[in-house]
Image (cartoon, rainbow, N blue to C red):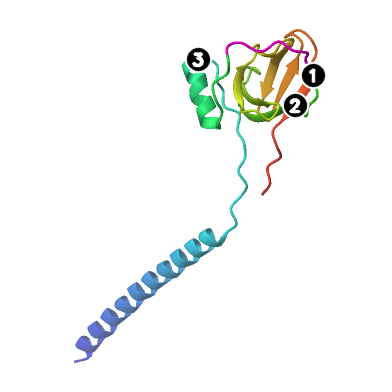
Amino acid sequence: MQKQFNQTQSSLWWQRGATFIVAALTAASATFWGLKLSAPVPPVQTVAVPAPGLEASDAQAWVRLLGGQKADASPTPEAVDVSSSRFKLMGVVAGLSRHGYALIATDGKAAKPYRVGASVEDGLVLKSVSPRSAELARTLEAPAGLTLELPKLTP
């Protein structure tokens, strides 16, 4: 009789131990997911994407992705006003060597894509791009005449 009581007692402790372990794992999982889902979402950060060999068709894909339209082949000749209020940087695809594309809106019109070295207007070219800015100058060799910045990210 004593032997049967000891077997029942040890069987009962095994069940209690297993129940305790399952309950502890359930509580730990619920706590983990509760903290994970209630944590604030960090702000989105921009990342420089190397774009060494983009072709013209790839450039148009980037433009569509950034929300722009195809650039006109023939710019209109007029006096160049290099005031920053005329130009607005809408997006950038920047490589590590400051080559890439910029999506620039001029005079409130729809944004158009420009490759580094392309003429934005007569007498004004896209000199270089970086992850958050683009520089315009009279020529590629000239110092930057205007630096356009993307708007600041707000959390």
- Residue at disc 1, secondary structure: loop
Q: Amino acid at mark 1?
A: Asp
**First-in-chain label (1 vs 2):** 1
Q: Circle 3 — which element?
A: helix
Q: Judging from the image, what secondary structure is the residue with disc 2 in? A: loop
Residue 56 shows which numbered tag? 3
Q: Along the line of sight, which residue is nearer the eye, 38 or 111?
A: 111
Whether tag 1 and tag 2 are in contact, CB under 8 A, the answer is yes
CA gap, disc 3 to disc 1?
Answer: 28 Å
Q: Report the residue marked by disc 1.
A: 81
Q: Is residue 43 above or below residue 10?
A: above
Q: Residues within 10 Å of mark 2 (few under 14, many from 20)?
A: few
Q: Position of residue 120 (x, y in %)?
A: 67, 16
Residue that carries the numbered disc 2 in the rendered image: 86
The amino acid marked with disc number 2 is Arg
Magenta span of residues: 73-80
Q: In this picture, is 135 found above or below 11? A: above
Q: Is residue 146 above or below residue 35?
A: above
Q: Report the amino acid beneath label 3.
A: Ala
**Quadrant assignment for the N terminus:** bottom left
User: Residue 77 lies in magenta, yes or no?
Assistant: yes
Local packing at callout 3 (Cα closer than 10 Å; few below 14, some 14-19, many 20+) is few
Within 10 Å of disc 1 (Cα), the crowding (few <14, some 14-19, many 20+) is few
Determine which quarter of the picture holds residue 40: bottom right
